[in-house]
Amino acid sequence: MATAQGAETIDNPRHLAGTLDAIRGVQREISRKEEAAKKASGRSRGFPISNRLRKAYDELRRLHRKVANQRHDFLHQVSARLINEFSALGLEALSIRNMTANGGQYKRGLNRSILDAAGGAFHQLLKLKAEEAGAWAVEAPTRQIKPSQTCHACGQQEKKPLGQRWHSCPCGASCSRDENAARVLLAWLERSLSGREPADAWREVRPGHPLDESALPSKRETHAIA
């Protein structure tokens, strides 16, 4: 989900995976009951809905609502914690549409995991909370710096397949793929924000907004996050 200070990894709890079997079971039950109702009424649409079918619909909604609430609470807790601990956050620009496009049957599970992680919503929360705290939450130009393909130690770029989760470079650098990408983002963030003040962040997140120094939150002297 995130790698803080290039060392600590915050795992994706995969809320949907924990409820997926129950959701599929209810969906199969709904499918059977709908087919029975269609057959009994002779109508493919507008067939009567029994109490048991209605209860199955309610159960499916309850399960989806449970997953959504779990995801919502987790994203708020993690984003609040990161903003409280760090004054600058480097975010890898995400294109969820491109990440989940095509792939066919073999990519269904990966696409489901990407959507379940809600990376876009996570970035939005980080940006909003950073704005409130007077901190920085900056999306890096991922296509230019290529954090997953660039060595954080020497800068050499090498394309890695998605399944390669360990970074090993001829220069001697060796760490997890996520940690390496986080360190590349961290270096980019430090270069981008070097010597800048909290007022600059306020103007960036609220362009054109009149600057009131008395209302400007004090910027914490903490480390950056990538």
Image (cartoon, rainbow, N blue to C red):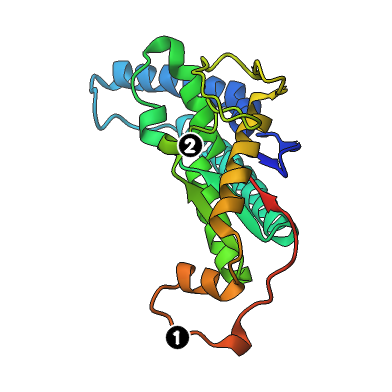
Which class describes the residues within 10 Å of circle 2: few (<14), some (14-19), or many (20+)?
some
Q: Where is residue 28 in the image (x, y as percent from the top left)?
A: 48, 18
Residue assigned mark 2: 145
Q: Which residue is drawn at 66% across and 31% down?
A: 153
Sequence-wise, the earlier of marks 2 and 1 is 2
Viewed as shown, does residue 197 lie left or right of 29?
A: right
Quarter that holds the C terminus: top right
Q: What element carries label 1?
A: loop
Residue flagged by tag 1: what amino acid is it? Answer: Pro
Q: Which residue is drawn at 49% across and 33% down?
A: 115
Picture layout, residue 215 above or below residue 219: below
Q: Where is residue 34 in the image (x, y as percent from the top left)?
A: 38, 22
Q: Where is residue 84 in the image (x, y as percent from the top left)?
A: 73, 61
Q: Where is residue 106 in the image (x, y as percent from the top left)?
A: 44, 10
Q: Is mark 2 on a helix, strand or loop?
A: helix
Residue assigned mark 1: 210
